[in-house]
Amino acid sequence: MRTTRLAPSPTGALHLGNARSFLVNWLLARQRGWQILLRIEDLDGPRVKQGADQQAIEDLRWLGIDWDEGPIHQSSHAASYETAVAKLLSSQWAYACVCSRREADAAASAPHAEDGGSVYPGTCRGRFSSPAEAYAQTGKKPALRFAVPRGVVAFHDEFAGTLQYDVSRQLGDFIIAKADGSAAYQLAVVVDDAQAGVNDVVRGDDLLDSTPRQILLYEALGMARQIPRYYHLPLVVGADGRRLAKRHGDTRLSFYREAGVAPGRVLALLARWCGMNVPTAVHCAAGLLETFRLERLSREKIVFTTADDAWLWAGI
């Protein structure tokens, strides 16, 4: 059975860009008979906002996006992450790193293309024989990094095509566990997807370069046969070309919902962003199943304009 997941992060409210990605994921799943898991990715410590997980659930239901299993929370999977970390350490795929906490914490969160970030120079690679030795020598609790091998990782993306990365030169060694012992984004999603049998991952193309990292983790953990099919979608951005954020005004689903904008109006805008010719409102997400086609999605970023925002308000 094919399985996918909707994976909101409760570090903020869902906005129109998130909604488009989730809608595409849901439409593909319902058209193709995939199971859908709802997973709350709540490992990002201080950035997690109280109640944001429940709000995400309400926003998805408001749009008519449902799921077959969940919600489950990543924060309940600590034992699984610890097992994976121990395996990577014992096989020397991971090592202790005592570089600054700020750098380690930033690197451990889910990345975005515009965040930039330099390639880690390998300062701590080979420096310590174990995390315990790193702590004994420096007095610092170490984070753990994955030791990226030399060479190219190539993969086929079902939307973006065939891609390849010279992983050691372009990406470098990345964080798999923070100094407090909690799992980092890259490791957590691999462990969770493998355990849940997720084999179709649909997400924004700001996570394209996470894919070679995650492929390496699957292989190092002996789970190469469980590497999913990936679908990376161009983002919805503001007029400045950057992914939607507060700087573009309030684009939260909850903002429109509480102001009285109908979910069908929002769905119609999302559908147009997906290459569908729809009326001014859609009764529910299921009403798009007959007309949605993955190949009709734009290969370019979708720009959310002031005219789009005005169109939503005109429906009140």
Image: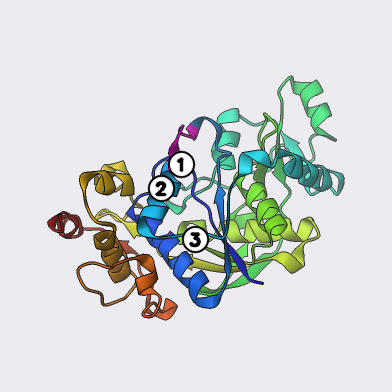
Between marks 3 and 2 in the image, the one whose residue lies nearer the viewer: 2
Which class describes the residues within 10 Å of circle 2: few (<14), some (14-19), or many (20+)?
A: some
**Residue 179: % across, % down:** 67, 30
C-alpha gap between disc 3 and disc 2 = 20 Å
Instruction: Verify whether residue 211 appears in magenta.
Output: no
Disc 2 designates what residue?
58
Quick check: 288 left or right of 133?
A: left
What residue range appears in magenta? 47-54
Q: Quadrant of residue 98?
A: top right
Which class describes the residues within 10 Å of circle 1: few (<14), some (14-19), or many (20+)?
A: few
- Viewer-side residue, 34 vs 45: 34
Q: Dot 2: what SS?
A: helix
Between marks 3 and 1 in the image, the one whose residue lies nearer the viewer: 1
Q: Dot 1: what SS?
A: helix
Which class describes the residues within 10 Å of circle 3: few (<14), some (14-19), or many (20+)?
A: many
Disc 3 designates what residue?
203
Q: Quadrant of residue 151?
A: bottom right
Q: Disc number at residue 54?
A: 1
User: Given contact means CB atoms under 8 Å apart, are the residues at marks 1 and 2 in contact?
Assistant: yes
* Mark 1: amino acid: Gln
Question: Could you tell me if residue 129 is visible in this image?
Answer: yes
**Residue 310: % across, % down:** 15, 56
Identify the mark nearer the N-term, 3 or 1: 1
